[in-house]
């Protein structure tokens, strides 16, 4: 045993001999639990109890529109969801939205991220990056609204340019062929900067020494990408894609404000659909069952996210 | 030499162009807030116009604008501060005492932020009705819960990065556990505290759905005002009002990401990816 250790034990002995009640509490086994208590209270009161309540409600027939008391119907709500063609189409619409939005954002973000890679000495870099990253911190309600102004059929600026190019105007948000694309475009505008940010982070995680070695060895661009950059950068890029996937799947505010699901139900994503069931038709039992399903989807996304995160820690030892 | 300099200049110009392209839609609204209502509705759109402050003055003089701004500020600052205090205590405990359930708990808490707001708002709505919590207190607690997952993740990451030797040195010198927590560890995780504060502030500041459904007069924030109070007398959207209000509202997040740019990465990834851009 080293002298430092002995000294430490001695000191602790002294500390222990003149301990106050507070000290005694700090050293007791209860202390760490006391530190966790506030967060557990929040978690239990605002997450665990509502979730259990929600799971319970999903087995009942219960609507605020009807005077009938809640009645137990086992899994009938889930059967109804399974048979609801409307819901299936909302799910598939959301799936298409997520795949297109995340796919395009990733491709654009990676390309622009590489473009911004060498910008360390750019004059006014901080201002330029602020301008670039503003779309992702703008209140979704505000961006939904001002894109409506931009898309406006008579005086919107987008239509001014469309008319210059094609000679006619398009009412983007009420046209069956354009509404989905118009909403998708706004999502891409908002979140491509995020993928640029993640690409820059991924590139930053490649050790300088390996890049310099590749330079010395005169590797081609493709060889550098595949053998040097990809093995290090892939984790952060994957985390970015997963975070975007989770976020895109949650999209509600934006469509609520821009199109409210219309025209017809062209832009009715699953988040908005759930909101409709719960607060327009006040069908608590049915919407609880739907919420349980969305919760399970969210939990599986989170597991994949953490799996990638742990994989990275394990591989990189970070 | 001359040609490489010319090339870097062109390169930087391209980067600036990309940044400005992404900013352009926001800039268009910024301009609209300085246009007269007639100029906003002009066909073809006016790119050069006589600026006016009347929209902004009109927005500020409407009875609800200032109270809603105060609500936004009050709710976001209070809930995020509370969340950070609570999360710091828990993050320290989870980092320094090895509980068996640590990873599972971290996972559960993170997953609460991955759920669409509409999914858990149904039971919360009923619960808040039953307890009569649809007031400032209830919304404040909800936003605190909303800010906890991210604060916990980021702070635990940062505290894990502080070597336990600092704690031990403290104990050797007779310091108490609380002293070590607040005087030794806390100062070293300052970047984490700042990132957690700024980004939760932006998230709560921008939140709409929960506020819309659960809020009452004491809790409604500007996004609510934007969504609800946008129709003017004629049944048409009052674009001058919308433009000036959203410009005013977007100012805070914009200033924040300018001032705290080096925390942006940590902030946008729930603290799971570190580094600067």
Image: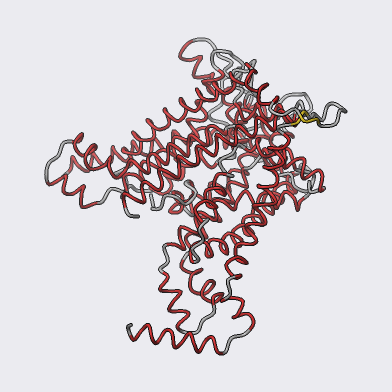
Query: Left or right: A112 with respect to A163?
Result: left
Residue under the point 80% across and 45% down: B217
Of all residues shown, which one is farthest toward the left? A217
The residue under the point 51% across, 25% down is A95
Q: Measured from the top left, where is residue A220 in percent x and y?
A: 16, 36
Name the spot of residue B185 as percent of width and height, x first: 48, 70
- Residue shown at 48%/80% (left/top)? B171
Q: Is residue B222 left or right of residue A215?
A: right
Please state, as top left, top right, bottom left or bottom right, where the N terminus of chain B lies in the image. Answer: top left
Residue at the (49%, 87%) spot, across then down: A13
As displayed, is residue B167 above or below residue B135? below
Q: Is residue B238 left or right of residue A19?
A: right
Does residue B82 lie above or below A267 as drawn? below
Q: Nearer the viewer, residue B29 or B270?
A: B270
Quadrant hosting residue A200: top left
Q: Is residue A31 above or below residue B80?
A: below
Residue extending furthest toward the right? A67
- The percent position of residue A121, horizontal first and vertical second, equals 31, 50
Q: Nearer the viewer, residue B194 or A223?
A: A223
Residue B232 visible (yes or no): no
């Amino acid at each position: 045993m080293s002298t430092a250790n002995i000294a430490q034990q001695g000191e602790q002995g002294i500390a222990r001999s003149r301990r106050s009640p507070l000290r005694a509490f700090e050293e007791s086994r209860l202390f760490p639990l006391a530190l966790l208590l506030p967060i557990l209270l929040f978690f239990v009161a605002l997450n665990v109890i509502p979730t259990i309540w929600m799971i319970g409600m999903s087995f009942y027939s219960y609507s605020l529109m009807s005077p009938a008391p809640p009645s137990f119907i086992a899994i009938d709500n889930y059967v109804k969801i399974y048979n609801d063609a409307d819901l299936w189409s909302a799910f598939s619409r959301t799936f298409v939205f997520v795949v297109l939005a995340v796919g395009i954002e990733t491709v654009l973000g990676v390309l622009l991220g590489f473009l911004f890679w060498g910008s360390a000495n750019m004059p006014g870099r901080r201002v330029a990056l602020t301008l670039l990253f503003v779309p992702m911190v703008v209140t979704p309600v505000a961006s939904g609204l001002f894109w409506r102004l931009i898309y406006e059929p008579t005086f919107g600026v987008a239509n001014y340019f469309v008319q210059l190019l094609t000679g006619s105007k398009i009412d983007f948000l009420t046209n069956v062929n354009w509404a989905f694309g118009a909403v998708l475009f706004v999502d891409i505008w908002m979140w491509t900067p995020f993928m640029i940010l993640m690409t820059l982070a991924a590139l930053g995680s490649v050790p300088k020494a390996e890049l310099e070695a590749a330079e010395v060895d005169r590797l081609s661009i493709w060889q550098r990408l595949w053998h040097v950059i990809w093995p290090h950068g892939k984790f952060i890029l994957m985390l970015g894609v997963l975070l975007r996937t989770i976020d895109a799947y949650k999209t509600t505010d934006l469509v609520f404000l821009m199109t409210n699901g219309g025209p017809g139900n062209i832009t009715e994503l699953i988040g908005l659909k759930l909101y409709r069931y719960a607060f327009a038709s006040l069908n608590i039992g049915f919407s609880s069952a739907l919420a349980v399903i969305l919760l399970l989807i969210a939990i599986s996304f989170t597991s994949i996210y953490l799996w990638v995160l742990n994989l990275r820690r394990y591989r990189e030892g970070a | 030499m001359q040609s490489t300099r010319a090339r870097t200049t062109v390169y930087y110009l391209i980067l600036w162009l990309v940044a400005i392209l992404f900013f352009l839609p926001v800039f268009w609204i910024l301009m609209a807030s300085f246009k007269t209502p007639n100029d906003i509705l002009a066909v073809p759109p006016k790119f050069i116009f006589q600026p006016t402050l009347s929209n902004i003055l009109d927005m500020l003089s409407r009875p609800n604008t200032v109270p809603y701004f105060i609500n936004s500020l009050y709710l976001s600052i209070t809930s995020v501060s509370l969340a950070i205090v609570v999360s710091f205590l828990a993050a320290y405990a989870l980092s320094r005492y090895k509980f068996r359930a640590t990873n599972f708990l971290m996972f559960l808490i993170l997953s609460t932020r991955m759920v669409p707001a509409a999914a858990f708002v149904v039971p919360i709505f009923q619960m808040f009705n039953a307890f009569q919590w649809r007031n400032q207190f209830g919304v404040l607690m909800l936003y605190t819960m909303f800010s906890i997952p991210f604060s916990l993740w980021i702070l635990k990451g940062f505290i894990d990065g502080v070597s336990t030797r600092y704690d031990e040195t403290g104990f050797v010198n007779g310091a108490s556990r609380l002293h070590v927590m607040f005087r030794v560890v806390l100062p070293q995780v300052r970047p984490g505290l700042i990132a957690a504060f700024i980004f939760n502030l932006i998230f709560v500041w921008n939140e709409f759905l929960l506020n819309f459904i659960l809020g009452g007069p004491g809790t409604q924030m500007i996004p609510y005002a934007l969504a609800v109070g946008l129709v003017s007398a004629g049944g048409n959207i009052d674009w001058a009002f919308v433009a000036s209000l959203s410009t005013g509202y977007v100012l805070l997040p914009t200033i924040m990401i300018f001032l705290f740019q080096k925390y942006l990465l940590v902030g946008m990834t729930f603290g799971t990816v570190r580094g600067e851009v």
